[in-house]
Image (spheres, rainbow, N blue to C red):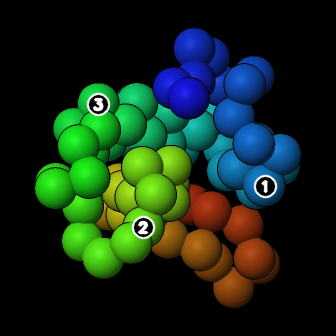
Amino acid sequence: MPYSSNKDLPDSVRHVLPAHAQTIYQKAFNSAWDQYKDKDERRGDESREEVAHKVAWAAVKNEYAKGDDDKWHPKK
């Protein structure tokens, strides 16, 4: 289930990530959703959705880090 906009992202993403990080998440999720549609492309028994969420979080963590204030900030 790809996301057509940031408004469609899960609350657990929308309420913790800044807008730019949400966009990164959305684009990475949608790309992974397409890339891992075949079960043979995934490791183990993870669902397509599980893999896409993991890829999306990894993409966010490449650009953002959680600060001491418990908020996500761009990496320098």
Which type of secondary structure does the marked residue at label 2 adopt? loop
Residue bearing the label numbered 3:
34
Of circles 3 and 2, the one toward us is: 2
Q: How packed is label 2: few (under 14 Cα within 10 Å), some, or many (20 or more)?
A: few
Residue type at mark 2 is Glu
Q: Position of residue 44 (x, y in %)?
A: 30, 76
- Residue designated by label 2: 46
Q: Residue 21 versus residue 11: which sits nearer the camera?
A: 11
Q: Earlier in the sequence, mark 3 or mark 2?
A: 3
Q: Residue at x 62, y 63 (%)?
A: 72
Q: Label 1 sits on what residue type?
A: Ser
Element class at badge 3: helix
Q: Are marks 1 and 2 in contact (CB under 8 Å)?
A: no
Q: Which residue position is annotated with label 1?
A: 12
Foreground mark, 1 or 2?
Answer: 2
Circle 1: element type:
helix
Q: Residue at x 40, y 30 (%)?
A: 30
Q: Nearer the viewer, residue 56 or 60?
A: 56
Q: Is residue 6 left or right of residue 24?
A: right
Q: Name the residue type under label 3.
A: Asp
Compared to residue 1, the image places residue 15 above or below, namely below
Residue 56 visible in image: no
Q: Which residue is at 65% across, 25% downward?
A: 6
State which tag comes first along the sequence, 1 or 3: 1
Q: CA distance from mark 1 to mark 3?
A: 22 Å
Mark 1 or mark 3, whichever is nearer to me? 3
Assign the N terminus to one quadrant of the image. Answer: top right
Is residue 72 left or right of 45 when viewed as pictured? right
